[in-house]
């Protein structure tokens, strides 16, 4: 069931811009809003290519997706606009993605895209169009709170996307709406069939939209040729175990692809970009209990001291109990985990929860 949108008056009093990716989720979000009586305008962002550069169809914001969004808008009888944000996306997301790998990190470009493109630039465009809200197809919930709207996990735990929304500001959350927060994926597909949408059976995108065939290392090497420089793979004591063909091929916690014969499975423990060195060791050496965070963003008023929380350290991981300790400087904090966690990768996000409510989060920093 479509949650209330927390807008005054009648639905017909409001224009809502829907960010339409050409997929099932955003298409159903638009259809539900129209059914409820809102005036809906669809906007699709051309972010990276028209399909050719990605080397495949079905990639977010590729040519096929723009075409699919236009077909859905025509079916729904709503205005639809395609905005060329390619240069903004390159500067704000793609370059950051590449630079992060060059620093030995493992980035999350979908969060940067939400933070720097969709919920900043597109939100401003929606306001310019006289909209009362910007709606997306994210599986997350927005609820009124005592100090303004709050962000919660989506009801479908398998589809919850609140992790990717932690960098949203409180001002942005005032304007955002998530019509699918109460739905499961199966229910959304059923709604797509009910509305007769031409993309009802379209598969979900599985990869980063701008990474051809899932080969992120190839893209990084093309845009930053210096990361192709070879280097050593060493153990924790600095003993050389082998050599590699570029740090872009590695991430903390990785087991496959090291090309080393050893008496036990070896994992990437650390990447040292300054000397192009990859440190490998046993799985037990991945255990971390203290995680440094930077660029902290709070969606609720931050506590003055340490607080007990749960934290997701990567999008596919389960939330783990921890204590969040404020840092010495603004925007910094330290997570002290109740139990060791493996494969804590710098560049990933740590999102902080109080049960289902998102308190905020930050970016995992490299250990000193």
Image (cartoon, rainbow, N blue to C red):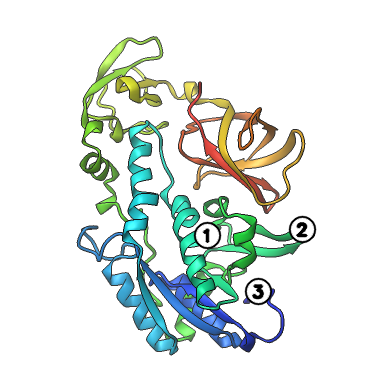
- In screen coordinates, is 25 left or right of 53? right
- In screen coordinates, is 163 left or right of 307? left
Is residue 351 visible in the rendered structure shown here?
no
Q: Residue at x 35, y 11 (%)?
A: 238
Quickly name the residue at label 3: 3
- In screen coordinates, is 113 left or right of 16? left
Q: Residue at x 45, y 25 (%)?
A: 283
Place of residue 81 in the rendered image (x, y in percent of width and height, measured from the top left):
38, 77
Quickly name the residue at label 1: 159
Q: Are marks 1 and 3 in contact (CB under 8 Å)?
A: no
Residue with the most extreme front position: 128
Place of residue 344 in the rendered image (x, y in percent of width and height, measured from the top left):
50, 32
Q: Residue at x 25, y 38 (%)?
A: 224
Is residue 16 visible in the rendered structure shown here?
yes
- Comparing 193 with 357, the one in front is 357
Against 77, residue 326 (above or below) is above
Quickly name the residue at label 2: 147
Secondary structure at badge 3 equals loop
Mark toward the viewer: 2 or 1: 2
Measured Cα–Cα span from mark 3 to mark 2 = 20 Å
Quarter of the figure with the N terminus: bottom right
Where residue 181 sits, quadrant-wise, is bottom right
Q: Residues within 10 Å of mark 1 (few under 14, many from 20)?
A: some
Among numbered discs 1 and 3, the one appearing first in the sequence: 3
Mark toward the viewer: 3 or 2: 2
Residue with the most extreme right position: 146
Place of residue 228 in the rendered image (x, y in percent of width and height, measured from the top left):
21, 32
Q: Residues within 10 Å of mark 3 (few under 14, many from 20)?
A: some
Q: Residues within 10 Å of mark 2 (few under 14, many from 20)?
A: few
């Amino acid at each position: 069931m479509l949650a209330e949108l927390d807008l005054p008056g009648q639905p017909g009093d409001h224009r809502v811009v829907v960010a339409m990716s050409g997929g099932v989720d955003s298409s159903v979000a638009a259809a539900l809003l129209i059914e409820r009586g809102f005036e809906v305008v669809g906007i699709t962002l051309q972010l990276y290519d028209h399909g050719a550069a990605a080397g495949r169809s079905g990639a977010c914001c590729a040519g096929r997706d723009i075409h699919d969004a236009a077909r859905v808008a025509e079916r729904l009888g709503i205005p639809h606009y395609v905005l060329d944000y390619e240069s903004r996306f390159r500067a704000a997301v793609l370059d950051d993605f590449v630079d992060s790998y060059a620093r030995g990190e493992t980035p999350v470009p979908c969060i940067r895209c939400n933070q720097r493109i969709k919920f900043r630039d597109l939100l401003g465009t929606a306001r310019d169009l006289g909209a009362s809200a910007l709606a997306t197809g994210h599986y997350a919930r927005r609820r009124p709170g005592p100090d303004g709207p709050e962000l919660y996990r989506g009801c479908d735990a398998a589809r919850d996307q609140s992790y990717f929304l932690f960098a949203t500001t409180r001002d942005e959350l005032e304007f955002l709406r998530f019509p699918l927060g109460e739905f499961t994926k199966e229910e959304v597909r059923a709604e797509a069939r009910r509305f007769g949408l031409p993309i009802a059976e379209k598969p979900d995108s599985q990869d980063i939209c701008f990474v051809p065939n899932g080969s992120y290392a190839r893209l990084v090497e093309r845009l930053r040729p210096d990361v192709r420089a070879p280097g050593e793979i060493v153990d924790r004591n600095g003993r050389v175990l082998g050599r590699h063909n570029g740090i872009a091929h590695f991430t903390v916690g990785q087991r496959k692809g090291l090309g080393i014969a050893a008496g036990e499975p070896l994992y990437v423990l650390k990447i040292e970009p300054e000397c192009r060195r990859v440190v490998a060791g046993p799985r037990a050496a991945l255990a971390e209990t203290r995680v440094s965070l930077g660029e902290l963003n709070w969606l609720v008023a931050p506590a003055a001291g340490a607080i007990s929380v749960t934290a997701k350290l990567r999008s596919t991981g389960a939330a783990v109990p921890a204590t969040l300790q404020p840092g010495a400087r603004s925007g910094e904090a330290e997570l002290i985990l109740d139990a060791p966690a493996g494969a804590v990768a710098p560049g990933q996000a740590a999102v902080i929860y109080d049960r289902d409510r998102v308190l905020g989060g930050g970016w995992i920093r490299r250990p000193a």
